[in-house]
Image (spheres, rainbow, N blue to C red):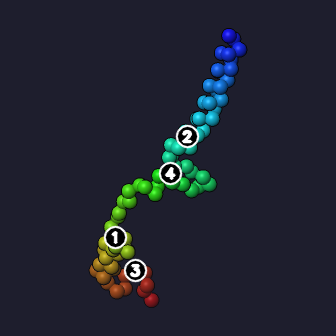
């Protein structure tokens, strides 16, 4: 009787040792390999998020404010005096 219990425990341990890596491979987690974030196995069936394109120059308001300040200061402002 003792031999059959040990055999059953060995089989159970072997089954668990084989099943756990197989199940962890099917979870669909992202992994970080060599600085890259690789997608899950389900990335082909995932819904796509759309972000509308914005302006090409992202600092348009800041550039306009700087030009307005330069125009207000005058043509000789800014250290280019000779």
One can see residue 59 in this view = no
**What residue is drawn where x is 58% and y is 35%?**
20
Q: Quadrant of the C terminus?
A: bottom left
Q: Does 20 appear above or below 38?
A: above
Task: Give the alpha-carbon distance from disc 3 to disc 4, as whole Å.
Answer: 54 Å
Q: Mark 1 = which residue?
A: 54
Indicate which disc residue 40 carries: 4
Indicate which disc residue 24 carries: 2
What crowding class fits label 2: few (fewer than 14 Cα within 10 Å), some (14-19), or many (20 or more)? Answer: few
* Observer-nearest of 6 and 29: 6
* Left or right for 9, reference 57: right
Give the label, 2 or 1, closer to the camera: 2
Q: Secondary structure at mark 2?
A: helix
**What residue is drawn where x is 55% and y is 40%?**
24
Task: Give the alpha-carbon distance from disc 1 to disc 4, as whole Å.
Answer: 29 Å
Residue 64 spot, x, y in % from top left: 31, 76
Mark before the other along the chain sequence, 3 or 4: 4
* Left or right for 58, reference 23: left
Q: Does 61 appear above or below 42?
A: below
Mark before the other along the chain sequence, 4 or 2: 2
Quadrant housing residue 53: bottom left
Task: Give the alpha-carbon distance from disc 3 to disc 1, as whole Å.
Answer: 32 Å
Q: Does 13 appear above or below 35?
A: above
**What residue is drawn where x is 62% and y is 30%?**
15
Mark before the other along the chain sequence, 1 or 4: 4
Mark before the other along the chain sequence, 3 or 1: 1
Q: Secondary structure at mark 1?
A: loop
Q: Mark 3 = which residue?
A: 78
């Amino acid at each position: 009787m003792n031999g059959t219990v040990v055999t059953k425990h060995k089989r159970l341990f072997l089954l668990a040792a084989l099943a756990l890596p197989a199940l962890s491979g099917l979870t669909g987690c992202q992994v970080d390999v060599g600085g890259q974030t690789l997608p899950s196995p389900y990335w082909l069936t995932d819904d796509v998020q759309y972000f509308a394109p914005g302006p090409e120059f992202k600092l348009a308001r800041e550039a306009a404010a700087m030009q307005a300040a330069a125009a207000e200061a005058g043509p000789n402002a800014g250290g280019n005096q000779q």
